[in-house]
Amino acid sequence: MNAPNPFSESDRIEGRAIANGLSVDVEDWFQVGAFETVIDRADWSLIATRVEGNIARILDLFGEAGVKGTFFTLGWIAERHPSMIKQIVDAGHEIASHGYDHARVFTFERKAFADDIRKAREILEDCSGQKVTGYRAPSFSIDPRSLWAFDELAEQGYAYSSSVAPVTHDHYGWREAPRFAFRPVEGSELVEIPVTTAMLGKRRVGAGGGGFFRVLPYAFSRWAIRQVNRVDQRPAVFYFHPWEVDPDQPRVDNAPLRSKLRHYTNLDKMAGKLSNLVAEFNWGRMDELARREARRAVPFMKDSDKAGTAR
């Protein structure tokens, strides 16, 4: 017997007029920023990966809901699991770039960044048989320290980026950035699609998924996506990671307490919450969302007072 649906019919169809962006940042449990000070990058190849099993669960979840999404994937992961990349593509999802090995953009000089995204793209296109047109910076690390990255993405022919978190956060964020689609390079068709924020009074709050979704009550994400869809009349951009549906992953005991709390809280609840989310709202791939939003993307200007969006 099927479990009762927790949403009324009005809830289920409420978001259908706007297709929100569904995305997965494909990295393994040991590659996250929370553990970068305690797990050496040089040791990654010695650690057993868990990403394939987690991606299989996600593909099943998306398939049951009948939704398509975008998988922003590390080149490091793709070159070790090429058959997994093919499974994602065969299920109708988009493969996009998350860089090669999760180094934050502002840690690069421009030439090294260019080499990183070129290497990752070549691996992803070889594995997927798809043209890769989208990019998401690890840890949303395009910010005022690394605006040159947009020029490089445009030069390499990317159609869109989803690399900005327009909030203040201790781990990432660019508070002054526009909340919705903007064109970061004058004369280029490149579109930046920031991850979702909502307005709590006059304060912006992160509401695009990841830890916000996993740790906070589901009602918060429902409220935020409804606000963006109803009030702003814009699509939400939601993301999560494969390791977030894996409550049995290894524990890193020597990590900082804050990092452990952020990483491990509610892992056992994540899959259920995701099932509710994909049932309640309308979802689609990021490349499709970027094409639609390009028509109303505002021009980017370095003077934040002229950035093109009030909220």
Image (cartoon, rainbow, N blue to C red):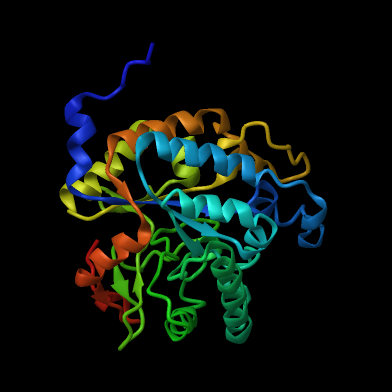
Is residue 89 in view? Answer: yes
Q: Residue at x 57, y 78 (%)?
A: 118
Q: Looking at the image, which residue sits at the far top?
A: 1
Instruction: Decide which of 136, 198 is in the foreground and name it.
Output: 136
Q: Residue at x 77, y 56 (%)?
A: 44
Is residue 179 in view? Answer: no
Q: Residue at x 83, y 53 (%)?
A: 46
**In the rendering, at what x and y percent does residue 197 appear?**
34, 53
Question: Residue 257 is drawn in which quadrant?
Answer: top right
Task: Describe residue 224's horizontal placement relative to residue 259 as left or right.
Answer: left
Task: Describe residue 89's horizontal placement relative to residue 301 as left or right.
Answer: right
Instruction: Decide which of 38, 134 is in the foreground and name it.
Output: 134
Tell me: residue 311, above or below residue 250.
below
**In the rendering, at what x and y percent does residue 57 appear?**
54, 37
Marks counted in the figure total: 0
Q: Residue at x 81, y 62 (%)?
A: 42
Tell me: residue 77, above or below residue 256.
below
